[in-house]
Image: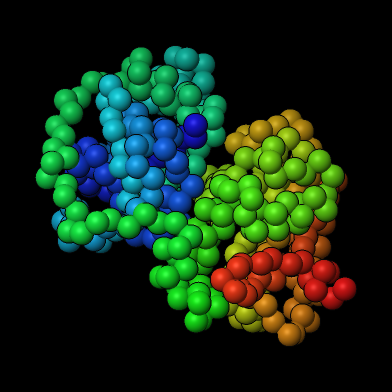
Amino acid sequence: MRYYILTTAKFVNECIKFQVYGSTNSNWLANIELGDIVFISQFSSKSQDIYGPFKVYKALFYDKKIIYPNQKYFYRIKIKPLNLRTIEETDLYLQGIKNKDLDLSFRFISLIQQNKHLHSISITKNEGKFLLNILTNYGKAIKVNTNTSNYLPDSKPSEVNLEFLENKNRLFKKHAFSSESDLESYIILSLKNKNSNIFKNFSEILNYYPDNNLTTSIIYNQFIFGNAYPSDIAIINSTNVNIFELKNNLFSKLSLEMIKKEFKKYCYYSLYSPRLLSKNTKQRMNFFIAFPKSKDHSFDKILKKEFGLIINSINKFRENNFATLEYYIDNNKLTFETLQDVKN
């Protein structure tokens, strides 16, 4: 069971009424599974409240029925309130003081304030239990006004699975994803199946580094190490922090400045992050950046040089590694390779 904070500016009543939460892109909810616990944060100039808990009883699906006025949040999950309560942000801070967990409550407030524009915020097991305890013991009970009978899809909703993404992106013809969000979703959904090509592929990539077993790791997407700037995919275990940055286009010099910023933010914020499994352990950091397959690999030297300059000041704290990946689609099969493998 995993925990998530879902965000909205003004539609929490619709979420509760229809027992549905929706997002604009597929990746925001792709990692959420049946039985997971979610909380909803409604953050606006008029209210800063957290609602929950909700239990997920239908994983990601696609439905065009309008339930949020004039908003097209078609990628959805179904959620069921469990003894629904709410707490204001300021009361969360106060309870953190009373329970001697001020750091944790302050972290939640920072995460929500800095990332209220995101649909979903992955939170750790300890963070989820903390928030669940605060809501259960100190939250204000609210009347649940549900009306799921009014939520009748226009047509049979589509399960968002690998086949859905393959058809949406026309992989049988284009051999490329139309967006990074769909690429990310495809990887996340594939990693749920230990027999999938992607799971085996990623296992081989991770196994290059010691004690880096995918089967014993936690897989996050859009994971935030500090208080902002989510990484595309983070695979974390007690010894390694693996960060995957996905690119939907070939490398260009115009993108270099953005990539340098990503290097710096993820490398620095993942250093002794309180959100990691072992904040007091010098976890090895492995940074992977993935591009579509190309004949020109000259950019690899540029990226390695820039990465080396950025980690020079933090190498004394931990081991930092970098690898460029290429991916391609052949016979509807997505495959990743390190450039070292390609060159060999």
Vertical relation: 230 (above or below) 12: below
Q: Position of residue 216 (x, y in %)?
A: 69, 37
Q: Quadrant of the C terminus?
A: bottom right
Residue 251 shows in this picture? yes
Tell me what residue is drawn at x 74 percent, y 30 percent: 280
* Residue at the extreme right of the image, as rendered: 344
Nearest to the observer: residue 218 or residue 186: 186
Res 225 → quadrant: top right
Q: Residue at x 47, y 68 (%)?
A: 166
Q: Nearer the viewer, residue 25 or 177?
A: 177
The colour mode here is rainbow
Q: Which residue sits at x=55%, y=78%? A: 175
Q: 238 or 259: which is nearer to us?
A: 238
The residue lying toward the viewer, choosing from 173 and 5, is 173
Residue 125 x %, y % = 54, 30
Image check: 12 left or right of 56?
left
User: Residue 39 sits in which quadrant?
Assistant: top left
| Left/right of residue 333 with respect to residue 297 in the rendered view | left
Q: Position of residue 156 (x, y in %)?
A: 24, 56
Q: Is residue 82 above or below residue 270?
A: above
Q: Position of residue 300 (x, y in %)?
A: 77, 74
**Residue at the bottom extreme of this rendering:** 295
Q: Is residue 39 above or below residue 261?
A: above
Name the residue located 18 percent from the left edge and 28 percent from the top edge: 144
Q: How many marks?
A: 0
Give the vertical position of 282 relative to 138 (above or below).
Answer: below
